[in-house]
């Protein structure tokens, strides 16, 4: 076992206090053999943290090993971890060493550990307790190995324990040290540096306009660092010039709710664009609209307008809104209660009659869908109403 090579650790962006804390913890974890659980959303950098622990540990001179516990059937995962002997199952044409044996003296990352079946969890627990590997189909005595185990997951394991899908004793075994990598949207300083790093990686010099940078800084990055790397790689590839502007960014980033809200000077268009984003699936009600409303980026007026647009489409049917907004049928009460609690329930009756609920809107142009079609509901209202919210409900004043 050699000493850690200081040039070895992969470069990790850590400009935010949260990532500095993560790396501090990774450094302390590297000094021991304690089993470490790395958690965080998809693409947040769990594997890079696991590799960092290995690279800073006394095991660094040996290669790092990883097994993805989600991508394999139970039989294959068992063989991948413990190895097998020839003929032990269909397709086992020759003896194969498992990763636990290959990683003897080194580190093994059990990626997506939350997806393991209960039977595999039992086998893993036994290994963690006795350090012994028994290859599938081999009845000779087990082999003792010295492997440092790091596990990673984007699941909330205590929730899986509560639902009976993950063993509590295994969770305690794996989580001697717990490192949680926060989502990128909570680490603005890192976001800026990740953007710089991604631009530097380009083969030709490229720059972002301040507007494009603003759009990237506001976006929520549900796919975290991996998404950011992909978005910038795509923008650089598809744009031949040296400057990347807003229109060179992929549509989901450009028309995300956060960016729609800031771009709009005329509030009347906010509901139109959110409605289109919901219908195209590029945003989701609970994940985007709900937090924006709670953060007060979205007003009650905007939300009511959105509901009205939906009711126009569904002819006043609130249940139909669920499908339109990509909500599950089980969400009916939650959705209803949410609207009621914030005084955003719009009376549905006027939408049932087919009467024009937007008296200020001009009749649709030939070839444009009727009011219940969404195209007729978008694009014309800003001009038609001069930015004034249109379609007040009878007997109701919009705020
Ligand atoms: N702090 C960081 N510094 C530099 N690169 C990073 C950082 N965090 C993540 N990355 C890069 O982002 C991408 C995703 O990281 P990684 O594979 O470690 O994420 P993950 O959390 O394991 O994702 P998943 O849950 O999808 O397996 C990789 O290309 C990685 O190099
Ligand atoms: Mg990973």
Image: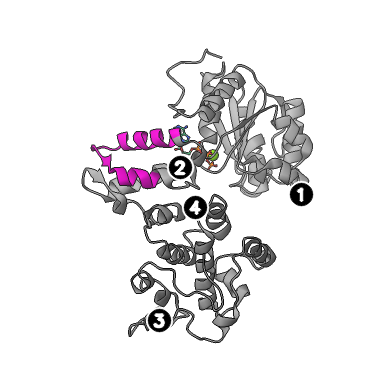
* Sequence-wise first label, 1 or 3: 1
Residues at marks 1 and 2, CA–CA distance in whole angstroms: 30 Å
Q: Residues within 10 Å of mark 3 (few under 14, many from 20)?
A: few
Is the residue 73 above or below the residue 124 in the image? Answer: below
Residues at marks 2 and 4, CA–CA distance in whole angstroms: 27 Å
Task: State whether label 2 is within 8 Å of ligand 1.
Answer: yes
Asked whether 244 or 332 is in front, the reply is 332
Q: Residues within 10 Å of mark 1 (few under 14, many from 20)?
A: few
Residue visible at 46% across and 62% down in the picture: 274
Q: Which residue matches tag 2?
A: 226
Task: State whether label 4 is within 8 Å of ligand 1.
Answer: no
Give the label on residue 163, or none: 1
Colour convention of the picture: one colour
User: Where is residue 175 shown, x and y percent of the image?
Assistant: 69, 31
Q: Which residue matches tag 4?
A: 297
Q: Which residue matches tag 3?
A: 369
Q: Residues within 10 Å of mark 2 (few under 14, many from 20)?
A: some
Q: Nearer the viewer, mark 3 or mark 2?
A: 3
| Magenta highlight: main SS | helix
Residues at marks 1 and 4, CA–CA distance in whole angstroms: 35 Å
In reply to whether residue 213 is colored magenta, the answer given is: yes
Q: What range of the chain is rendered magenta?
A: 189-216
Asked whether 212 or 240 is in front, the reply is 212
Q: Label 4's element?
A: loop
Give the label on residue 137, or none: none
* Sequence-wise first label, 4 or 3: 4
Residue visible at 32% across and 48% down in the picture: 235
Whether pointer 1 and pointer 4 mark residues with C-beta atoms closer than 8 Å, the reply is: no
Asked whether 105 or 356 is in front, the reply is 356
Task: State whether label 3 is within 8 Å of ligand 1.
Answer: no
* Sequence-wise first label, 2 or 4: 2
């Amino acid at each position: 076992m050699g000493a850690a090579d200081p040039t070895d650790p992969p470069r990790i962006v850590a400009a935010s206090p949260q990532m500095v804390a993560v790396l501090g913890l990774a450094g302390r974890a590297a000094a021991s053999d304690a089993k470490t659980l790395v958690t965080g959303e998809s693409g947040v950098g769990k594997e890079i943290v696991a590799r960092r622990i290995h690279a800073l540990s006394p095991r660094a001179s040996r290669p790092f090993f990883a097994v993805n516990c989600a991508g394999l059937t139970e039989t294959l995962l068992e063989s991948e971890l413990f190895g097998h002997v020839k003929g032990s199952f269909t397709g086992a044409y020759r003896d194969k060493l498992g990763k636990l044996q290959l990683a003897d003296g080194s580190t093994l990352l059990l990626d997506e550990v939350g997806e393991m079946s209960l039977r595999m969890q039992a086998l893993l627990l036994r290994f963690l307790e006795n350090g012994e590997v028994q290859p599938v189909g081999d009845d000779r005595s087990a082999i003792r190995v010295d492997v440092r185990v790091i596990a990673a997951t984007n699941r909330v394991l205590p929730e899986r324990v509560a639902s009976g899908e993950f063993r509590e004793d295994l969770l305690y075994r794996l989580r001697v040290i717990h490192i949680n990598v926060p989502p990128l949207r909570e680490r603005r300083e890192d976001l800026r540096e990740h953007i710089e790093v991604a631009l530097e990686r380009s083969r030709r010099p490229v720059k972002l306009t301040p507007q494009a940078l603003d759009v990237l800084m506001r976006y929520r990055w549900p796919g975290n660092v991996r998404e950011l790397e992909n978005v910038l790689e795509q923008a650089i590839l598809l744009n031949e010039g040296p400057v990347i502007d807003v229109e060179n960014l992929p549509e989901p980033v450009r028309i995300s709710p956060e960016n729609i809200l800031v771009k709009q000077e005329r509030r009347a268009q906010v509901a139109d664009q959110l409605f289109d984003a919901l219908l195209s699936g590029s945003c989701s009600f609970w994940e985007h609209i709900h937090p924006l409303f709670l953060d007060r980026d979205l007003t009650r007026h905007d939300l009511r307008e959105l509901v009205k647009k939906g009711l126009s489409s569904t002819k006043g049917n609130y249940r139909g809104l669920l499908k339109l907004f990509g909500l599950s049928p089980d969400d009916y009460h939650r959705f209803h209660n949410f609207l009621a609690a914030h005084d955003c329930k719009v009376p549905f009756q006027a939408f049932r009659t087919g009467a024009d609920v937007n008296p200020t809107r001009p009749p649709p142009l030939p070839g444009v869908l009727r009011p219940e079609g969404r195209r007729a509901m978008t694009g014309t209202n800003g001009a038609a109403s001069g930015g004034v919210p249109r379609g007040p409900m009878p007997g109701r004043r919009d705020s």
